[in-house]
């Protein structure tokens, strides 16, 4: 069903203000991407060993999900993403177990992924993102 933690998303007002910390820890800045549908600019960091990534998330405006998160909670961990091989099957399996989904169908994510969010009311208060990478 899942392939482990893919990344941890951290909401921030400024990608540049917090990038030095992650590079100082040895994370490698891979790339930046804008996801207009989600209203967010994303900066990706990877460990040299290829472990879970860190994504810094900066809102494009205050009325986006990340903008609203920052207004309500301030900077910090916004979500934990779990990699899945078949996101549709995972969504259906979770729903059949009574898990509440924010996205009933996958939406376009960063780097050509398909994503869907699990509602925090079903996860003990943690926003969980399901991530499916394009098959080669």
Image (cartoon, helix red, strand yellow):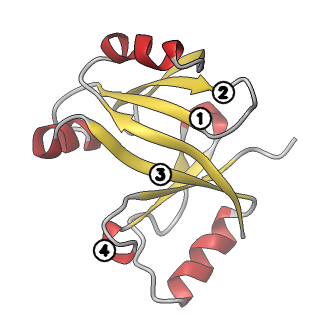
Helix, strand or loop status at disc 2: loop
Residue labelled with disc 1? 53
Cα distance between the residues tagged 1 and 2: 7 Å
Q: Residues within 10 Å of mark 1 (few under 14, many from 20)?
A: some
Q: Residue at 27% of width from left, 44% of height from top?
A: 65
**Residue nearest the viewer, comparing 87 with 31:** 31
Q: Which is more foreground, mark 4 or mark 1?
A: 1
Q: Are dots 1 and 2 in contact, CB under 8 Å?
A: yes
Residue 21 versus residue 53 in the image, above or below: above
Asked where in the image residue 128 lies, by quadrant, the reply is bottom left
Q: Residues within 10 Å of mark 4 (few under 14, many from 20)?
A: few
Residue 100 versus residue 23 in the image, above or below: below
Residue 45 is left or right of residue 124, and the answer is: right
Q: Residue furthest front?
A: 25
Residue 135 versus residue 117 in the image, above or below: above
**Which numbered disc flags the more N-terminal residue, 3 or 2?**
2
Cα distance between the residues tagged 3 and 4: 15 Å
**Which numbered disc flags the more N-terminal residue, 3 or 4?**
3
Residue labelled with disc 2? 47
């Amino acid at each position: 069903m899942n392939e482990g933690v893919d990344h941890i998303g951290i909401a921030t007002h400024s990608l540049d203000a917090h990038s030095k910390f992650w590079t100082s820890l040895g994370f490698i800045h891979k790339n930046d991407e804008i996801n207009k549908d989600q209203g967010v600019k994303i900066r990706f960091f990877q460990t040299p060993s290829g472990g879970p990534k860190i994504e810094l998330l900066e809102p494009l405006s205050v009325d986006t999900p990340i903008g609203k998160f920052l207004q309500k909670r301030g900077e910090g961990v916004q979500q934990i993403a779990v990699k899945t091989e078949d996101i549709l099957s995972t969504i259906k399996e979770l729903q059949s177990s009574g898990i509440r989904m924010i996205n009933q169908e996958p939406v376009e994510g960063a780097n050509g992924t398909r994503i869907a969010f699990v509602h925090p009311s079903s996860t003990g208060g943690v926003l969980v993102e399901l991530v499916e990478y394009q098959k080669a």
